[in-house]
Amino acid sequence: MKRVATAILALCCSLAIQAQDRQQILKVYNWGDYIGVGVIEKFEKWYQQVTGQPIKVSYVTYDYPEECFDMIKDQQTEVDVFCPPEYLAERMMKHKMLTPIDTSFVAQGIPNYLHGTSPFIDNMLQHIGEAQGITAKDYTVGYLWGNTGVLINTKFVKPEEVNSWAFLFDSKYRGKVIMKDSFSDIYNVFINYAFYDDIKSGVTNRNLLAAYLTNRNIAIVEDLLESARPQMKGFDVEDDKRLMSAGKDWMSVTWNGDARWAIDEAGDNTNLQYVVPIEGSDCWADCWVIPTTCKNIKAASLWINFLCRPDIALLCMEETGYSSAIGTPEILQAVTNDSLPAIDLSYFFGPEATAVHVDSVMYPTKDVISRCSYLRDSGDRQEVLREIWEKIKEKPVVDYWFYVIAGCVALFMIITTTLLLRQKKTTTIK
């Protein structure tokens, strides 16, 4: 009996130590290449300063957030803080998979940076929350945002050639287009293209098309994907920007932040330009959330708060090429460059930003924003779309030029062999 009691006591002590240690660990799941240099270390140092307790960030990256969502939903992993796109945040709301952000740290004298997000991003997320009957701000905070367009190497492609998404169906670009491996973004590209005339005439609305994936619309997009497949050279999430910056590829359907990164990395040797075709595209926002699997809500909440601090937001922008959801005067001042044309960014920074000199790749103009739909969750309909996308990706593309060249070579060899045989026969007769 004494041994049993001793064993139970040892087990309880072990569990207590593990629980204590777990409060010193923060498990963060984020996209790859999606955080500023040194931010994790800065957070660990700041956390100990403001709480008096040590923290160690366990940082995990992913390429496909849907896979991470599935793991969280099935409770296959413990995640304290997660960075999904807004449509997955919406799905997590539907499944009651989110825990409210704990702002009780304010009572401890820790500054609250959560209110620095742009009203543009807040409104985008709030629409999602309203559909679920919750206040989105209590559960989600914007991180980085952007849109989808096409990055071209002007050595091979001129901007006017990609003014319409019709280039995706032009055999002239067969095997020349790198596609961003993100089925939701690509769906929005194709649905905007397919219904452009109806959108212009007011018959339909691009946001309704993005939110409601009907069987008819999915079938239309699938047909368009089939037609565009021969032009697709490959599918990528991270390396497309590096391939384009190297200067050997023609174009990439990509996100504006990756385009900005590639343009900066390419330098003067390669002229890259980013274009959002006339039919429109999508506008998205990645956000921080705390899943119900969280074991350290305090640290998770402080992580989200810390990432909203303007100086930290700028570090993340500088490293990733994406625009922060933070819309404070400090951010506007930091991104202002008087050598750039003035554009109206009042939709993001407020009424004082009607003519500001900033990079229009990082901060799309009001015209571009007006042509973008917002990503929304359509549940099992999106799973159908994902299956179609995987099927399209796996479909082999017949390289007709290979067969033409091979045929020409074969014909040349046949003709040459025939002539040699005739010459040999003639010589033998003589």
Image (cartoon, rainbow, N blue to C red):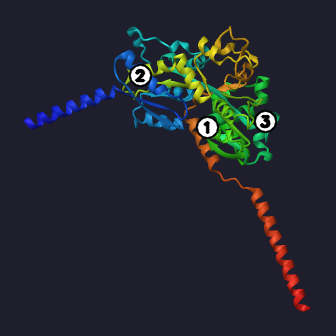
Q: Position of residue 94 (x, y in %)?
A: 49, 26
Identify the mark at residue 182; answer none if there is no mark.
1
Q: Residue at x 88, y 82 (%)?
A: 423
Q: Answer with left or right where residue 135 lies relative to residue 45.
A: right
Q: Residue at x 42, y 11 (%)?
A: 110
Q: Is residue 100 visible?
A: no
Front position in the image: 266 or 23 = 266
Front position in the image: 226 or 109 = 109
Q: Quadrant of residue 430?
A: bottom right
Q: Are marks 2 and 1 in contact (CB under 8 Å)?
A: no
The residue tagged 3 is 162
Disc 2 residue type (three-letter): Lys
Identify the mark at residue 45; answer none if there is no mark.
2
Q: Quadrant of residue 338?
A: top right
User: Is label 2 in a helix, a strand or a loop?
Assistant: helix
Q: Position of residue 251 (x, y in %)?
A: 72, 40
**Mark closest to the chain's N terminus, 2 or 1:** 2
Q: Are marks 1 and 3 in contact (CB under 8 Å)?
A: no
Front position in the image: 322 or 297 = 322
Q: Position of residue 34 (x, y in %)?
A: 55, 31
Disc 1 residue type (three-letter): Ser
Q: Residue at x 68, y 12 (%)?
A: 346
Which residue is outermost to the right? 430
In space, the residues marked 2 and 1 are separated at their CA atoms by 35 Å
User: Is label 3 in a helix, a strand or a loop?
Assistant: helix
Q: Nearer the viewer, mark 1 or mark 3?
A: 3
**Mark closest to the chain's N terminus, 2 or 3:** 2
Q: Position of residue 81 (x, y in %)?
A: 45, 27
Q: Residue at x 10, y 37 (%)?
A: 3
In space, the residues marked 2 and 3 are separated at their CA atoms by 47 Å
